[in-house]
Amino acid sequence: MTALYSAVGEQLTHYAIDFDNFELVRRGTVTLPAPVQYLWPHPSRRHVYVVSGHRGRNGPGVRHCLNALVVDQAGDLRLHGEARDLPMRPLHVSVDRSGRYVLSAYNEPAGVTVHRIGADCSVGAPVDQAAGLDLGIFPHQILTTPGNRTAILVTRGNDAAGGKPEDPGALKVLSFADGVLGNVASIAPNRGYGFGPRHLDFHPQRALVYVSLERQNALEVYALEDGRLGAAPLFHKTALADPGNVRPRQLGGTVHVHPNGRYVYVANRADWTQPDSEGRQLFAGGENSLAVYSIDERTGEPTLIQHADPMSFHVRTFAIDPQGRMLVAASIIPMDVRDGGGVRHVPAALTVFRIGVDGMLTFVRKYDVATDGKTQFWMGMV
């Protein structure tokens, strides 16, 4: 059984999936202590771990938390054990390959924590980490590698802005043993300048890692050997249909490799607005799409074959079901757009695509999602 979960603010909602008709059926909702940032399943798929927190806020009454939840036979969720307070707003969470540890990444300031997982899969105590870990600038994701002996921390860096120079990005390779992290290598082509990685995914059959570059709107491929990344990308590909016309707030996003290893998908996000004559903020251009690539079975090289329209704006997360039949994209915010002589309101949405045998996406349906001033910040399938 595969379930879809979507988070709007503190509310995490379960949708049952009807694969015969490619429909989503809304079921129950649980409330977390703070706005949901990310969710990751335990290898058993009977529990999930959720990090929640407030953007740019610390102080009295503000919580940043790590929670375990039980997944029942129908896919419904309920809180399990006590929430663990976190030092600041977490941006990503994952579970190591053994199912014994939860790893969380923090962007401002850069940080990581590792918590033990109890015998009942509740969240246990944090693991003490050595001082001097190289955590880069603006971590966005942390994942253990397939062998579970290393972890990769994806650090985006920042573009130059407001008189402040560019902060370089990097892929930080860290040793991982008994929940303890240590420095191994920093992969930063051109010393990290012009290199802004956001997310990565592992090829399911080959020792290859696919990395989306947020600040360069691109996809890169790296070799993976004994838990370590090659120093330079094997391939670099644009994610945009019109890379010669990049508008403000044009960003690369999540990357997922198809379960069969023959295709890879990257989200393109844009939410740049400008006021019209009446002072309304309207979408001012950019690419909102899902870039689809075929993967060369011999070399791992991706070739761009499609841009699919999610019919919404700023797809921050998307997911593919384990059988590779369906892709669902989640846009985080509503947007007003020019439509002829008028203005059309486009809500945040869950957009359902059928995945063909050729890896290409066919639009099936779209579900509008009421955000009520919040954001649909995370969505995924378990």
Image (spheres, rainbow, N blue to C red):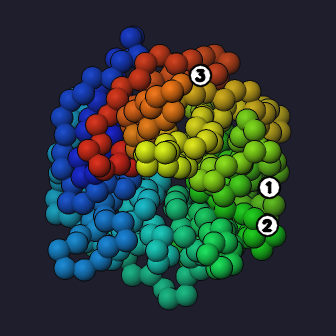
Amino acid found under the numbered disc labelled 1: Pro
Instruction: Describe residue 362's horizontal placement relative to residue 31 as left or right.
Output: right
Residue under label 1? 233
Residue drawn at (38%, 11%), measured in percent from left and top? 21
Number of callouts in the render? Answer: 3
Residue 220 in the image: state x and y as whole percent. Answer: 74, 50
Residue under label 3? 361
**CB under 8 Å between discs 2 and 1:** yes
Q: Quadrant of the C terminus?
A: top left
Instruction: Describe residue 329's horizontal placement relative to residue 308 as left or right.
Output: left
Q: Which mark is residue 131?
A: none
Residue at the front extreme? Answer: 277
Residue drawn at (52%, 62%), measured in percent from left and top? 140
Residue under label 2? 189
Amino acid found under the numbered disc labelled 3: Leu
Q: Mark 3 and mark 1: span between their CA atoms? A: 27 Å
Between discs 2 and 1, the one toward the N terminus? 2
Between discs 3 and 1, the one toward the N terminus? 1
Q: Mark 3 and mark 2: span between their CA atoms? A: 32 Å
Secondary element under disc 2, as helix, strand or loop, is helix
Between discs 3 and 2, the one toward the N terminus? 2
Residue 92 in the image: state x and y as whole percent. Answer: 44, 59
**CB under 8 Å between discs 3 and 1:** no
Residue 172 in the image: state x and y as whole percent. Answer: 63, 69
Q: Is residue 127 visible?
A: yes
Crowd band around label 3 with a 10 angstrom C-alpha radius: few (<14), some (14–19), many (20+): many
Residue 26 in the image: state x and y as whole percent. Answer: 24, 27
Q: Quadrant of the N terminus?
A: top left
Q: Is residue 3 above or below residue 31?
A: above
Closer to viewer: mark 3 or mark 1? 3
